Amino acid sequence: MTTQIPIELLNDAFNVFRDASRKLEQQYSLLENRIEELNAELAEKNRAIERTRRLAAMGEMAARIAHEIRNPLGSMAIFATLLERELADEPDKAKLAEHINKGIKTLDNLLSNMLLFAGSPEAKLKPVELNDIVDDAILLAGDRGKAGVEIRASYRGRKRVMADPNLLRQLFLNLIINALDAVEEDGRIGISVDTETEEGGVVIKVSDNGRGIPREEIDRIFDPFFSTKERGTGLGLAIVSAVVDAHMGRLDVQSEPGKGTTFTLGIPAGREYLS
């Protein structure tokens, strides 16, 4: 005896099969799209890894080159200084030797920034005299060829603290150079160091009456390789930020175009600080 399946049941089964097939096709399509997205993400990550490897290799190479350049640069600085002294009675020639010295200082600062940036600085704390550090930085910075620029340093509280002298010297040097680049001739740069804070730490302010920083750029000034200067490397303020971080400090900047800029740095106190 043959049992006949009702046509309605067949239609229902066919509709269920068709709906299931449609859903499977949709899921398959979504799966294909997701696979394509994952492949694209993987390719981008592979490219990013390759870029990171190349940058790391370039950083290592730059650090080695910087070390190699620094050795003859030191000799050049000594000879240029001796030459400047020998030519004291011949001002025109002595001026040329002075220009050589300034160029050497600029190169040395650039190399220092490159080495610090490549090496991710770590603070090696030791007792340091803040006024000596500031004086060294002012001497190294020079006047950048701008006559009549006045740099004043003031201190409040104890002069001796625990910090990394080399990192702190580079920090002050970069901030002073940044200020010198911002001011015109007869500009004013102020450096204040306050160790009598409520927290017992160190507050450092470097201010100038230069051209200031546009509001749309102020959030980017600490980014590596960002520079508004025609020949700037964009490493100076990035190193300042890295040095502050290495001391577990804080960094703030206030600027008004046409009136000047003030950088405020706070280095926290702790049991390492001397009273």
Image: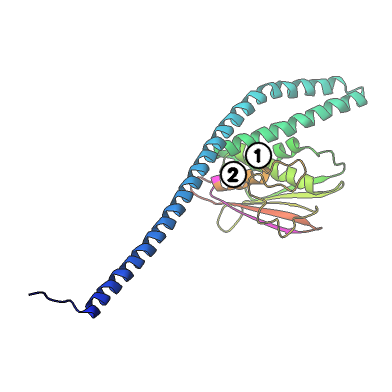
Query: How far apart, in angstroms, are the residues tagged by discs 1 and 2?
Result: 9 Å
Residue 134, placed above or below residue 201: above
Q: Is residue 205 left or right of residue 90?
A: left
> What residue did someone put label 2 on?
243
Say what amino acid the circle numbered 2 marks.
Val
Amino acid under label 1? Gln
Q: Please give the name of the residue rendered at 75% of the width and 36% of the height, measured from the top-left corner.
A: 139
Image vertical order of residue 187 relative to residue 167, above or below: below
- Please tell me whether mark 2 sits on a helix, a strand or a loop: helix
**Label 1 packing within 10 angstroms: few (<14), some (14-19), many (20+):** many
The residue positioned 59% from the left and 47% from the top of the image is 244
Residue 266 - label: none
Q: Main secondary structure of the magenta part?
A: strand
The circle on residue 170 is 1
Between 107 and 26, the one lying in front of the other is: 26
For the rendered model, the colour scheme is rainbow
At 32% from the left and 69% from the top, the residue drawn is 18
Q: Is residue 30 magenta?
A: no
The picture places residue 210, in percent across and down from the top left corner, at 80, 52
* CB contact under 8 Å: marks 1 and 2: yes
Q: Who's the residue at 18% across and 76% down the image?
A: 5
Residue 248 location in percent, x, y?
53, 49
Q: Quadrant of the N terminus?
A: bottom left
The answer to whether residue 123 is seen in the rendering is: no
Instruction: Please indicate whether residue 86 sits to the left or right of residue 154 in the image.
Output: right
Q: Reply above or below: 70 against 140.
A: above
Place of residue 111 in the rendered image (x, y in percent of width and height, measured from the top left) = 66, 32
Magenta part of the chain: 246-256
Q: Is residue 272 left or right of residue 156?
A: left
